[in-house]
Image (cartoon, rainbow, N blue to C red):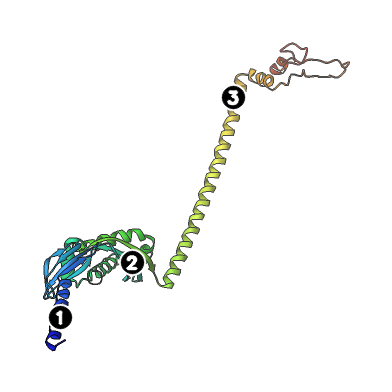
Amino acid sequence: MTPKTLAGWIAGALVIFILVIAGSSATYVVEPGHRGVEVTLGKVSPGFKPEGFGFKLPFVTTIVPQMIRQQTAQMVADCYSSDLQQVKIAVRVLYRVPEASVVTVFRDYAGDAFSSLVKPRVAEALNELTALRSAEMIVQKREDVKSKALEGARRKVGDVLTIEDLVLEDINLTKALENAIEAKMVQEQEAARARFAQQQAQVEASTVVIKAKGEAESIILRGKALRENPSVLELQIIEHWDGVTPLVVGPGATGANMMLPLGDFTTGATPNQPEGVK
């Protein structure tokens, strides 16, 4: 093989290699859940590239993928309560870059939306909220703190990003403050038990009084009924009679059984003695 032929083969191989490189550089693929930002010689195109296969200018144009799926990131916000207590809140942020904001986030926030936009806004919202509440209220009203912080963070971020949710994973207080809050809660529980015992005693005392009043009124009514209608006593005797004839053996009796009429007792007369004779 002559040198001229060898040089021709080498030149042909270089042309084929360059064409392959140029062909691969002239195409791009945007993966699902992403959008492509077109950068040509340092200039960002105002439109984004949808997912899928496409063509671009080789060597001078780059397609940078940007995720539009929901993302999760963690952060810790150092806050101070209204009573000047330090509160550390561990937060998990769920956020998403809208399709329309892909180019803006890439151009204005270097493609890292969380560190440059989401994190400082969430921390600011939490600091504003905790400054209006005591440390004890921050712990007790955890869900309220979360909902209001989410509302404030969304307002601060605006339409550039969508903050889906905030999860307050942990609220850390100083050890001395935790002990003070725990002691206060124990005292409140003991006071609540004492109030319950006092109320229960008052209810029991009232029940006894009501029962006693009822019994007294019942006795008065029964006595009044007997005075106004003596036959009531006779009726009660009949109601409680067991069916056995009463037996009375008087002095000097021969042992014979004697029936005593009920009327003798109700009218005050003695047996076998007319009424009115003493």
**Counting residues from the N terminus, which is met first, the one under dot 2 or under dot 1?**
1
Disc 1 crowd rating (10 Å Cα; few below 14, some 14-19, many 20+) is few
Q: Is residue 232 above or below residue 3?
A: above
| Residue drawn 14% across the image and 88% down it | 2
Q: Outermost residue toward the top?
A: 274
| Residue 263 found in image quarter | top right
What is the distance, in whole Å, between disc 1 and disc 3 at their CAs?
131 Å
Mark 3: amino acid:
Lys
Q: Which residue is mark 1?
A: 14
Report helix, strand or loop for mark 3.
helix
Residue 75 place in picture, x, y as percent: 32, 70
| Residue drawn 35% across the image and 64% down it | 168
Report helix, strand or loop for mark 2.
strand
Disc 3 crowd rating (10 Å Cα; few below 14, some 14-19, many 20+) is few
Residue 169 seen from this side: yes
Front-most of 272 and 5? 5
Residue 254 place in picture, x, y as percent: 89, 15
Look at the numbered discs 2 and 3 and tell me whether their residues touch, using CB distance below 8 Å. Answer: no
**Counting residues from the N terminus, which is met first, the one under dot 2 or under dot 3?**
2
Mark 2: amino acid:
Val
Q: Is residue 190 above or below residue 61?
A: above
Front-most of 200 and 119? 119
Give the label, 2 or 1, closer to the camera: 1
Q: Which residue is mark 3?
A: 224
Report helix, strand or loop for mark 1.
helix
Residue 62 seen from this side: no
What is the distance, in whole Å, between disc 2 and disc 1 at their CAs?
56 Å
**Counting residues from the N terminus, which is met first, the one under dot 1 or under dot 3?**
1
Q: Which mark is residue 91?
A: 2
Give the label, 2 or 3, closer to the camera: 2
Q: Quarter holding the N terminus?
A: bottom left
